[in-house]
Amino acid sequence: MDFNLDKSLSVLERTPRVLRTFLAGLSSEWTLANEGAETWSPFDIVGHLADAEEANWIVRARLILAQGSNRRFEPFDRTRHLSLKFTQTLEQRLDRFETLRKANLAELESLRLTPDQLDLKGEHPEFGPVTLGQLLSTWVVHDLGHLAQIARVMAGQYREAAGPWEAYLPVLQRRP
């Protein structure tokens, strides 16, 4: 399936609300748990999503649309949020993500992208040439992947408590 802006917006605009509904007011037992060393908690994931709003999707879309001589993306620091772990609350992270997402979606909609623009290319530091349509599609999948990750991390707290039902609960299957 090709990239569809309206379909994508219907997911992207909901993510902040889904996260707030799912996480706000939960105890830190739920929001700070992770899957072990070098894995992320729901709290960490919200921070990562906010950082991506600030430094990834729209920044890279602007670079592609400018079609200047340098179309190479700056590397995205996927772990920047970890350095802010003890300076922000979950509520602050949710607020920051929501504010940044609203602004980014307003800018995205204002671009009134054409099919030709979706085929414009930038250069990813690892993957090489990528199109604007691929970048925007990845934004949607990135949101959905992290929503699934949050559910998996939280469900994992009850892996042993579920007993034999673990066999029927794919969300409890151990990470590869």
Image (tube, helix red, strand yellow):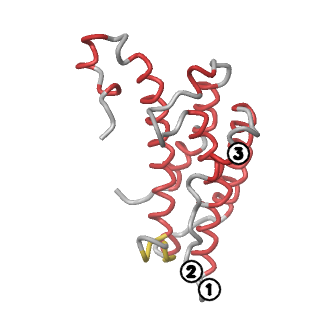
When the figure is inspected, residue 88 is found, relative to residue 166, above or below; the finding is below
- Residue 13 appears left or right of 157: right
The three-letter amino acid code for the residue at tag 3 is: Leu
Name the secondary structure under disc 1: loop
The three-letter amino acid code for the residue at tag 2 is: Arg
Instruction: Return the x and y of residue 120 as percentages of the image width and height.
Output: 50, 76
Q: Quadrant of residue 60?
A: bottom right
For the point 24% across and 11% down, the residue is 164
Mark found first going from the N terminus, 3 or 2: 2
Q: Residues within 10 Å of mark 1 (few under 14, many from 20)?
A: few
**Residue pointed to by mark 2:** 71
The three-letter amino acid code for the residue at tag 1 is: Gly
Instruction: Return the x and y of residue 54 as percentages of the image width and height.
Output: 68, 56
Q: Residues at badges 3 and 1 in contact (C-beta under 8 Å)?
A: no
> Which numbered circle lies on residue 68?
1
- Residue 171 appears left or right of 27: left
Alpha carbons under labels 3 and 2: distance apart = 30 Å
> Which numbered circle lies on residue 114?
none
In the rendered image, the quadrant that contains the N terminus is bottom left
Mark found first going from the N terminus, 3 or 1: 1
Q: Residues at badges 2 and 1 in contact (C-beta under 8 Å)?
A: yes
Q: Quadrant of residue 173?
A: top left
Q: Residues within 10 Å of mark 3 (few under 14, many from 20)?
A: few
Instruction: Return the x and y of residue 80 as percentages of the image width and height.
Output: 63, 53
Residue closest to the eye, 34 or 100 = 34
**Residue pointed to by mark 3:** 84
User: Outermost residue toward the front?
Assistant: 37
Alpha carbons under labels 3 and 1: distance apart = 33 Å
